[in-house]
Amino acid sequence: MTSTEALPAIAVYGATGHTGSYLLAELRRRGITPILVGRNADRIRAAAHAADLPNADIRVADLHDHAALVTAFTGAGVVISSLPAYVENGAAVLAAAIEAGAHYTDISGEQLFLRRVFEEFGPRAAAAGVTVVSGITDNNLSGDLLAHLTTRRVAGPAEVVLSHLSRSGGNGSKGSAKTVFASLDWFRSGGWHFEGGELRTGTTARRDKMTFPGDAQPTPVAKFPQPPVVTIPRHSEVSSVEGVLATSILDLLSGFTAELIETLPDEPSSDLRYDLVVDTFGVDGRRVRGVVSGVDSYRDSALMAVETAFRLAAGVAAPGALAPAEAFDAADFLDALAPFGITWRIEES
């Protein structure tokens, strides 16, 4: 990649949270002193101090102050947005980044926001000459890139099923719970799947059981609104794309209330190992499975977002809103994560 001396400035909005701490640590490791933007100067300074970034450029801008956000992002080459509940909070940062002429990435995990990124903000980004790659998480980026690789190994159009598996039984953060709660009805409904050339709603998954890596018996699953459902059809020949999740986890998510969320710890569990599984079925019945195995969903999402920001800063992608596999070489990006213990593989049967 391009040397740090040649890179434009990277701004981070929302660096004071749990995932934000991983973003700052990785930027520091790469020799970058970021622009830190947020609503509370004292909290931003505390985050910079904790990350050993005493020279960080601190700028204050509220989400509801568009002019202040644009001013804060002016001079940045890339903006990384780290927020809870992008369906409620995400558009303000994205709009300001585009107006400031900065490339943009985020750690969103919501279908509704991602579709809005492409439909509303994609044309704005293209007109401004900047690139937007949204939804960079352990789940979304991995699923999109793996689907790009696996669909090219089967006879198409392919059926794609995405599954996210906890390998530790750990619990997420309060911020993650707030994200789910902000779109609770959407999560309960199963969100979108792709079929017949369009995004469709409906609660029933095409497959109600999946046998996951290392398991002898199938697991009951139900439809879940995985964001790669929105991105995969942009670059791969598919007849259907859907996300599923173990019914036991879905039952837990559907029981969220505002009161319950306030009792949850701010920090997630310390052990958050996972597998992101993409099963791709060809028209001849042949299956190809792609698996990304990671260490910590929050840490890994931050690492992926920083890698995305570096690639955007290097100017490797076309202007507009792009899926990860449209912006980057899938295998090359996944290989770049290996030093962090994030591995990937493709199994053919």
Image: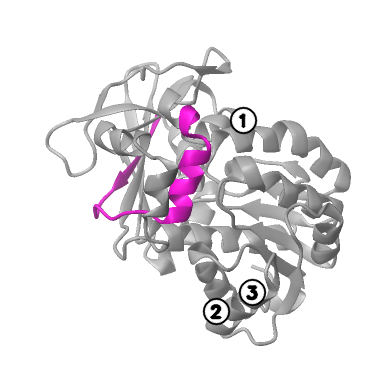
Which residue position is annotated with label 2? 29
Report x, y in % for residue 316. Answer: 71, 55
Q: Which mark is residue 166?
A: none
Image position of 6 with respect to 284: above or below = below
| Up/down of 294 relative to 210, above or below | below
Front of the two marks 1 and 3: 3
> What amino acid type is highlighted by mark number 2?
Arg
Outermost residue, left side: 216
Under circle 2, the secondary element is: helix
Question: What's the magenta region?
Answer: 161-186
Q: Which residue is mark 3?
A: 44
Question: In the image, which is nearer the foreground, mark 1 or mark 2?
Answer: 2
Q: Split into 4 quadrants, where in the image is the N terminus? A: bottom right
Taking the magenta stretch, the answer to whether it contains residue 184 is yes
Viewer-nearest residue: 115 or 129? 115
Looking at the image, is mark 2 or mark 3 nearer the viewer? 3
